[in-house]
């Protein structure tokens, strides 16, 4: 309460006494003097018109820089009052204005390098014993100036600790051996910016940087990291570092190009003055609100926040260097502003200034005398003050260690500035219960705070929403976007591709793309992420795969439902064939069996039985043996059956159509000579099959194209001509049998042996027509099953057409299966010539 009362009293007092002696508060002698470089003012004149090396007058006060300078003054006075740090040592300070201009900064830097007690710099070969005016330098703030002074101070190995220069170049110890800083480098901030964009899935952005060292290097490092992360920068440009009327056209073009890209997120890696010029022009054009990602150089700049209607630009998410509260600083500044308005205090403070040569020191901060506490009260908690505070304490701790200070006193010995460097490189100290340490790049990385601008009745406020230390921690619920529904704006050129997807560039930007799934049997290789690589032939992959898998084998398995059904049918047919064979053997000498061929029928039935067994060669994994013999085995068995039908068919045609043929012809078709005809027919088929197996056998082959995840193992026919030849031979036998029997007349109510052969051949032809149609339409994996079904259907057709009717007569019409019945039938026959072979016909039941 007392502090607030004092603050209000000082406001009223400053209203009466407008002039102060604040400009006299930046110099104080001591045992060891620290130089300070702070932007107390800013230049408003065009230096290109400068033709003589005269004084550069900076007329505009930069109140933020003034507060930073007071932060250094406060830290030194606090150290001087300490009994533990540099006890017995009085630190002095000599704070100068940089005006944010190299010309002004060099002038002050040369003064720091003058020999102690003089105003001149000696040109020496060896500066080991040279004692400079100051022991170390705090500042400057911006990287452009730091790069100049770091080269200059590096020659003398004069320690320099910056509280704001973040350029990555300054981390190069070979070029800047005496440079240190209490802020992280721009590379760390670039990493934080990229993680923020990635957090919100913003990959279609504009990136701008100020046309100075800070902006150029920062924008370059950010662009590199953003591109590596897959963020597409639609537009990238540099804005003038010190905008003038001539730069208006360039700013107009930048704004126009940003609008054309239709991005909703703009990253501004810039110091505050260029940002002010850009945003003022943006507001004057009445452009739509955007998301502005601010770097630490302007995220909390009062120059930018003072722009009228600045809250209408959209959402501003900024990074600020993580700092802390400087205890006692607000009270100190309040007391100081009250003191500088007192005449006695000012007379004492101005005495050191009167003893110096004004021509050497250059311009003083006359504008500082017009500042009241009310003008700077909102800056007293500026986080940059903390980095200044830490910078001063780092030099004090280095000096404490170099002097070898004891608990109660420090020896007052001469310490050269360069002797502090080794201490600074490994410096560790604790300040306000927080540990600090210089890293290998001469930097202190405390991380960043993430803030969002929020419009409040009293003006803009900075709402903390997260922080960054190696990784970004963000509370998105606290961020209120400028959109109507408070949802994050969408600024995407692409969706992040997932595993198994590749990028297909669209439009004019190479980083703008669609995500395309890798198709079947292709995969996204870790080595070649831009293309889908084909899987090896023996492997497969599903859609959107990142690897290939070995194919499983596919053929007809014994446990498949379809195969089990076919096996049941095959067993049924084989059992039926065995039963018919047994019945024929039992009644071998009966007229019915003899009329059907006698022992030749037994041979035919055994051939049908073996033909059914040959179907097992089509089931299971194909091998060289099974593939080479499955077709010949089936063809030979069928030929054995049809050869018996051929003998019987020729016998019938001789008896019915060629009645005048010699008796010797019939002898070759009956009795034991008929076996010679059967043997000759089977021998011919055997020769064809032997040629097929020897010359062009079927071989197992792998079909990788038919099935997605499996390899089809099937028997590949090498010669379709040989395949057709061995099966056409049986077709020819069937055709001859059909021609010999289909015209034979059937006596009324009598069983015709010829008709059984006719229907058997018809069953064979119908089966083959069905098989060929089915085989050509089903999937190749089921083609062997189609062939099995066709063979079984053919076998069943032969049994049902030729053998089953005879079994019916044998079992249920035994009176017809007698010699007397056949002799009676011969007498009733239509032609007497038919009685030569009464075994051709037998009676049929009603």
Image: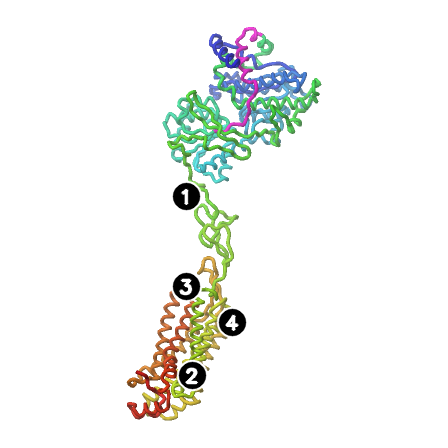
Can I make out residue 134 in this image?
yes
Query: Which residue does the image show at 40% across and 89% down from the upper left?
Result: 670
Q: Which residue is labeled 1 in the image?
A: 506
Q: Which residue is labeled 3 in the image?
A: 779
Q: Which residues are magenta?
A: 318-347
Marks 1/4: CA–CA distance: 56 Å
Can you say whether 413 is above or below 685 in the image?
above
Q: Which mark is residue 403?
A: none
- Residue sitting nearer the eye, 32 or 331: 331
Marks 3/4: CA–CA distance: 24 Å
Label 3 or label 1, whichever lies nearer to me, is 3
CB within 8 Å, label 2 to label 1: no
- Residue sitting nearer the eye, 496 or 478: 478
Q: Which residue is labeled 2 in the image?
A: 584
In which quadrant of the rendered image does the C terminus lie? bottom left
Counting every numbered tag in the picture gives 4
Q: Which residue is labeled 4 in the image?
A: 625
């Amino acid at each position: 309460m007392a502090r607030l009362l004092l603050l209000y009293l000082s406001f009223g007092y400053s209203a009466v006494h407008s002039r102060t002696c604040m400009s006299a508060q930046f110099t104080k002698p001591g045992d060891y003097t620290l130089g300070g470089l702070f932007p107390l003012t800013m230049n408003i004149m065009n230096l290109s018109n400068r033709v003589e090396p005269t004084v550069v007058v900076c007329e505009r006060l930069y109140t933020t820089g003034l507060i930073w300078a007071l932060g250094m003054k406060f830290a030194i006075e606090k150290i001087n009052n300490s009994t533990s740090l540099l006890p017995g040592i009085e630190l002095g300070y000599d704070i100068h204005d940089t005006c944010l201009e190299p010309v002004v900064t060099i002038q002050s830097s040369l003064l720091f390098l003058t020999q102690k007690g003089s105003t001149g710099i000696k040109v020496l070969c060896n500066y080991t014993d040279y004692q400079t005016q100051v022991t170390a330098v705090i500042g400057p703030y911006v990287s452009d100036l730091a790069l100049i002074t770091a080269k200059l101070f590096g020659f003398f190995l004069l320690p320099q600790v910056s509280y704001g220069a973040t350029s990555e170049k300054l981390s190069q110890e070979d070029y800047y051996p005496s440079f240190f800083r209490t802020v992280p480098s721009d590379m760390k901030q670039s990493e934080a910016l990229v993680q923020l964009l990635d957090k919100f899935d913003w990959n279609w952005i504009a990136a701008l940087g100020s046309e100075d060292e800070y902006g150029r290097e920062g924008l370059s490092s950010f662009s590199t990291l953003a591109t590596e992360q897959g963020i597409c920068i639609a537009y990238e440009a540099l804005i003038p570092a010190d905008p003038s009327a001539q730069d208006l056209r360039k700013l107009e073009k930048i704004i126009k190009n940003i609008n054309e890209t239709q991005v909703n997120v703009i990253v501004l890696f810039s110091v505050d003055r260029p940002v002010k010029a850009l945003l003022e022009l943006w507001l004057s054009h009445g452009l739509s609100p955007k998301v502005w990602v601010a770097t630490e150089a302007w995220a909390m700049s009062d120059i930018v926040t003072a722009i009228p209607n600045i809250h209408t630009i959209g959402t501003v998410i900024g990074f600020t260097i993580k700092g802390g509260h400087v205890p006692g600083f607000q009270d100190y500044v309040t007391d100081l502003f009250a003191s500088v308005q007192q005449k006695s205090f000012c007379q004492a403070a101005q005495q050191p200034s009167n003893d110096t040569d004004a021509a050497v020191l250059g311009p003083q901060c006359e504008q500082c005398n017009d500042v009241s506490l009310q003008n700077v009260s909102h800056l007293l908690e500026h986080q940059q003050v903390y980095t200044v505070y830490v910078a001063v304490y780092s030099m004090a701790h280095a000096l404490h260690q170099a002097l070898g200070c004891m608990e109660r006193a420090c020896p007052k010995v001469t310490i050269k500035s360069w002797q502090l460097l080794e201490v600074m490189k490994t410096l560790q100290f604790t300040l306000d219960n927080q540990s600090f340490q210089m890293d290998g790049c001469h930097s202190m990385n405390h991380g960043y705070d993430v803030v969002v601008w929020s419009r409040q009745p009293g003006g803009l406020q900075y709402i903390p929403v997260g922080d960054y230390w190696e990784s970004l921690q963000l509370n998105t619920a606290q961020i209120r976007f400028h959109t109507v529904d408070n949802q994050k704006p969408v600024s995407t050129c692409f969706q992040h591709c997932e595993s198994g997807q590749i990028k297909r560039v669209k439009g004019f930007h190479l980083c703008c793309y669609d995500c395309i799934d890798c198709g079947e049997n292709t995969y996204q290789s870790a080595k070649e992420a831009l293309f889908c690589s084909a899987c090896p032939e023996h492997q497969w992959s599903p859609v959107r795969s990142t690897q290939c898998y070995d194919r499983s084998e596919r053929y007809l398995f014994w446990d498949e439902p379809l195969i089990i059904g076919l096996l049941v049918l095959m067993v049924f047919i084989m059992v039926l064939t065995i039963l018919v064979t047994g019945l024929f053997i039992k009644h071998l000498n009966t007229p019915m069996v003899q009329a059907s061929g006698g022992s030749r029928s037994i041979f035919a039935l055994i051939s049908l039985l073996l033909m059914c067994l040959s179907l097992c060669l089509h089931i299971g994994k194909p091998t060289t043996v099974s593939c080479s013999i499955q077709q010949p085995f089936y063809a030979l068995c069928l030929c054995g059956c049809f050869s018996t039908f051929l003998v019987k068919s020729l016998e019938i045609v001789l008896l019915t159509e060629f009645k005048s043929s010699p008796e010797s012809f019939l002898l070759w078709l009956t009795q034991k000579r008929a076996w010679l005809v059967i043997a000759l027919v089977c021998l011919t088929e055997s020769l064809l099959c032997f040629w097929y197996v020897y010359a062009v056998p079927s071989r197992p082959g792998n079909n990788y194209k038919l099935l997605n995840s499996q390899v089809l193992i099937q028997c590949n026919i090498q010669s379709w001509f040989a395949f057709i030849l061995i099966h056409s031979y049986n077709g020819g036998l069937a055709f001859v049998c059909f021609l010999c029997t289909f015209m034979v007349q059937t006596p009324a109510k009598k069983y015709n042996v010829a008709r059984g052969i006719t229907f058997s051949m018809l069953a064979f032809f119908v089966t083959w027509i069905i098989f060929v149609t089915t085989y050509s339409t089903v999937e190749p994996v089921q083609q062997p099953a189609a062939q099995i079904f066709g063979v079984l259907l053919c076998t069943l057709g032969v049994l049902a057409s030729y053998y089953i009717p005879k079994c019916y007569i044998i079992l249920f019409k035994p009176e017809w299966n007698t010699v007397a019945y056949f002799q009676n039938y011969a007498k009733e026959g239509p032609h007497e010539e038919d009685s030569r072979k009464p075994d051709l016909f037998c009676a049929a039941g009603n």
